[in-house]
């Protein structure tokens, strides 16, 4: 059986530091600390749960869960991210899709993805040189009708079971949920940050009570954290791969200057 | 809050996917408004093209960002929000 060697979650982008240099420095230090911890775990494969921003998966066809199944990806290059190819794993991805199908989840397979910043930036940070093969795991929270937190939690459990039952004994997998926290991008409330909601999410996950977040509906998350705040689903997925694990807040900053609550946590299986 | 009809989203998605189409649109949007069968109020709000107009129309937030970028004059962008961080990672933007 393989092992989930660690689970982490953090916001998936940063912005210019000039408006808030102290907070920006703390966020960046926190992100680099998460990167350091992930690399120290020496994973054989990295699962990054995130969302596309209607670059690869548009409103033309809205699948709730999509994994990349290619052996190599080239980033889209938005936000100036270098278009340096990095490794995927068809063998792991297809194995997961088959396993999930047997567990009640029909996950879509994507052969062609040019990952935008939602995937490419955290990958650039935690996987320098693209040396660790990655599974791009998309939770399509940009959809008009996003998946429910309870389904996301269940699918995280399927990932945990897949690694435990189907993977080689020595294989070490690290899961990173990338995105969030609360933000109302291009909505009338833009600039608002719901610090209380963000801290509630961090607190529940860090104290081993992430499963309690499944009582929320996607509509409630949208109301409390903004449409873009639905990215907290990626945190729920990561936590579900190590259920009841406790962890620690690595950083949190409410940043209206970046129109976002910026956070990061590490969970110890 | 209103949600823009799919024909509006389809136009912006196509502009995002096709730089030649985006250039055509910036030069003269009227033929594309006709081609995508946009209603008069939809055309007017897209001509206006402000964040407020796009919100009024109910454009998806991610597509608002793309539309605003497409309408921006070429070359008006700076080095990008990640520039200093990429330098820190020794990855020049």
Image: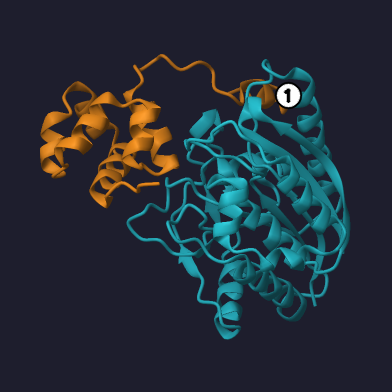
Chain colours: A cyan, B orange
Extreme residue in the bottom direction: A102
Q: Is B40 situated above or below A235?
A: above
Q: Is residue A245 visible?
A: yes
Q: Residue at x 81, y 29 (%)?
A: A26
> Camera-side residue: A20 or B45?
B45
Q: Position of residue A67 (x, y in %)?
A: 54, 63
- Expressed as whole percent of the image width and height from the top left, the position of residue A85 reads 56, 43
Q: Chain for mark 1? A: B
Badge 1 density bin: few <14, some 14–19, many ≥20, Cα 10 Å: few
Q: Is residue A10 left or right of residue A218?
A: right
The correct choice, above or below, for B74 with respect to A153 in the image is: above
In the image, residue A13 sits, relative to residue A5, either above or below, namely above
* Left or right of residue B37, residue A118 in this image: right
Where residue A23 sits in the image (x, y, percent)? 77, 25
Please state, as top left, top right, bottom left or bottom right, where the C terminus of chain B lies in the image: top right
Using the rendered view, name the quadrant where residue B50 is placed.
Answer: top left
The picture places residue B51, in percent across and down from the top left corner, at 40, 28
Mark 1 element type: helix
Residue sitting at x 54%, y 58%: A219
Q: Quadrant of residue A55?
A: top left
Q: Residue at x 80, y 69 (%)?
A: A243
- Determine if residue A48 is in view: no
Front in this rendered view, residue B92 or A34? A34
Total count of labels = 1
Q: Nearer the viewer, residue A210 or A219?
A: A219
Dot 1 corresponds to which residue? B88
Residue at the image point whose x is 85% and y is 46% from the top: A249
- In the rendered structure, the answer to whether residue B65 lies left or right of residue A121 reads left
Decide if residue A19 is on the left or right side of residue B38.
right
């Amino acid at each position: 059986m393989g092992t989930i060697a660690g689970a982490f979650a953090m916001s998936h982008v940063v912005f210019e530091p000039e408006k808030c240099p102290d907070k920006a420095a703390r966020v960046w230090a926190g992100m680099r600390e998460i990167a350091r911890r992930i690399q120290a775990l020496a994973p054989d494969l990295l699962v990054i749960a995130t969302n596309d921003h209607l670059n690869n998966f548009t409103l033309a066809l809205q699948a709730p869960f999509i994994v990349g199944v290619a052996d190599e990806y080239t980033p889209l290059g938005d936000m100036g991210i270098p278009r340096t190819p990095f490794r995927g794993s068809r063998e792991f991805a297809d194995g997961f899709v088959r396993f999930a199908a047997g567990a009640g989840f029909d996950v879509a397979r994507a052969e062609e993805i040019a990952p935008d910043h939602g995937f490419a930036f955290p990958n650039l940070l935690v996987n320098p040189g693209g040396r660790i093969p990655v599974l791009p795991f998309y939770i399509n929270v940009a959809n008009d009708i996003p998946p429910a937190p309870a389904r996301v939690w269940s699918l995280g459990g399927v990932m945990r079971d897949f690694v435990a039952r189907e993977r080689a004994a020595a294989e070490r997998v690290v899961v990173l949920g990338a995105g969030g926290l609360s933000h109302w991008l291009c909505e009338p409330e833009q600039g608002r940050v719901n610090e209380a909601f963000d801290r509630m999410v961090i607190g529940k996950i860090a104290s081993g009570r992430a499963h309690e977040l499944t009582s929320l509906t996607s509509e409630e998350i949208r109301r409390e954290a903004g449409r873009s705040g639905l990215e907290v689903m990626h945190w729920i997925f990561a936590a579900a791969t190590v259920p009841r694990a406790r962890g620690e807040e690595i950083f949190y900053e409410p940043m209206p200057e970046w129109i976002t609550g910026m956070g990061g946590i590490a969970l110890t299986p | 809050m209103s949600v823009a009809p799919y024909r509006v989203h389809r136009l912006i998605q196509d502009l995002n996917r096709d730089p030649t189409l985006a250039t055509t649109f910036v030069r003269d949007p009227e033929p594309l408004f006709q081609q995508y069968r946009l209603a008069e109020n939809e055309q007017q709000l897209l001509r206006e093209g402000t964040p407020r107009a796009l919100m009024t129309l109910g454009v998806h937030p991610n597509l608002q960002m793309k539309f605003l970028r497409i309408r921006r004059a070429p070359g008006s962008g700076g080095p990008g929000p990640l520039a200093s961080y990429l330098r820190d990672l020794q990855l020049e933007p």
